[in-house]
Amino acid sequence: MNPTRTITRNRGIVIAVGIVGLSMLAGCERGGRTVVQRGPNGASMGVVYNTATLNAAYAENQAPEAAPDVPADGPKAKDVYQNVQVLGDLSAAQFGRLMVSITQWVAPPDQSCGYCHQGELSSDALYTKVVARRMLQMVRDINSQWKNHVGATGVTCYTCHHGQPVPTQAWFDAVPAAHRGLTVDRGYKDAPGANVGLTSLPNNALSTLLVGTAPIRVQGPNALPSGHGVPLTAAEDTYGLMMYMSGSLGVNCTYCHNTHSFQDWASSPPTRVTAWYGIRMTRYLNNDYLLPLASTLPANRLGPMGDGPKVGCATCHKGVYKPLFGATLAQHYPELMGTAAVMPAAAPATGE
């Protein structure tokens, strides 16, 4: 047997198999690719978008028409209606306009005003009205105190709800292995989690890092693991959160990081600072608004572990880099820009 001929034949088989494999992989993703360069050429700073996915997301992330403007003068809502605790500074006309808009943004089509009101409009008998009042306070808080994240665009109820009573991308605590009949508990890493890009990273990363005040970091300040104050599992949780954020915005890592040095803030795109404030804002909203509301909700609104729905990046972004692709719906509702006493966290420190 001629060894040269055998090597050539085997090489041809390998090439043929490779071509077939690539052609099969090409069918796994629909649509073409669009690469947006976010840094110096040659620095691997391109954000890759799937064209078909982006087009589908565009169709699903269109803002509704704003209601026609109404006079700001006239009697105040607090003088016309009873038990108006948040929007009493609006004129009665502005108040009615916003109520109609909120109904379209949040309430089921078959319930309309009855979703939050039953009998006497001033009654707080329905939990939905209690929750809606608190959510109005939250929206005003976001728009007035978290401009480092939402900018001048702001948010409305529609940003998260998209016409549904519960946002589709709200999240609940992960179910431990023992509750799913598994005999081996691998610390929430026993199955690929949807919230962490179907990886085997801890699928409770959101419960760990989007509530409370746990540190979000991959590296400790010291070279050796002992005594540096950051457990090695923190890196897994952080990577899990990063996978979630990537999927939430429909982007890859280079949207916020320079691949030359992931931890270096000076060479990172400005979006990394925006994301830093977004994480802190999300924690604040969950800690101060969503977690306390769990006791107000009925059982059918709770997750499998008895916790209430919480917000994350995907709750607003829904797979696109800017909620509703940057539509300025909130600018048509200045009454939602509001004021609040709580200020956001300070700017990020190096390495955090």
Image: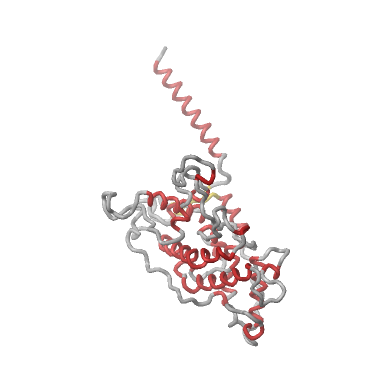
Quadrant of the rendered image containing residue 119:
bottom right
Q: Position of residue 124 (x, y in %)?
A: 64, 73
Position of 220 relative to 124 (above/below): above
Render colour scheme: secondary structure
Q: Nearer the viewer, residue 62 or 192?
A: 192
Q: Residue at x 47, y 55 (%)?
A: 206
Q: Nearer the viewer, residue 169 or 67?
A: 169
Q: Residue at x 59, y 72 (%)?
A: 133
Quadrant of residue 276 within the rendered picture:
bottom left
Q: Position of residue 174 (x, y in %)?
A: 51, 51
Q: Is residue 179 above or below residue 346?
A: above
Residue occupying image coordinates x 47% and y 56%: 207
- Quadrant that contains the N terminus: top left
- Figure quadrant of the C terminus: bottom left
Image height of 214 relative to 334, above or below: above
Image coordinates of residue 222 in percent, x first then y, are 26, 53
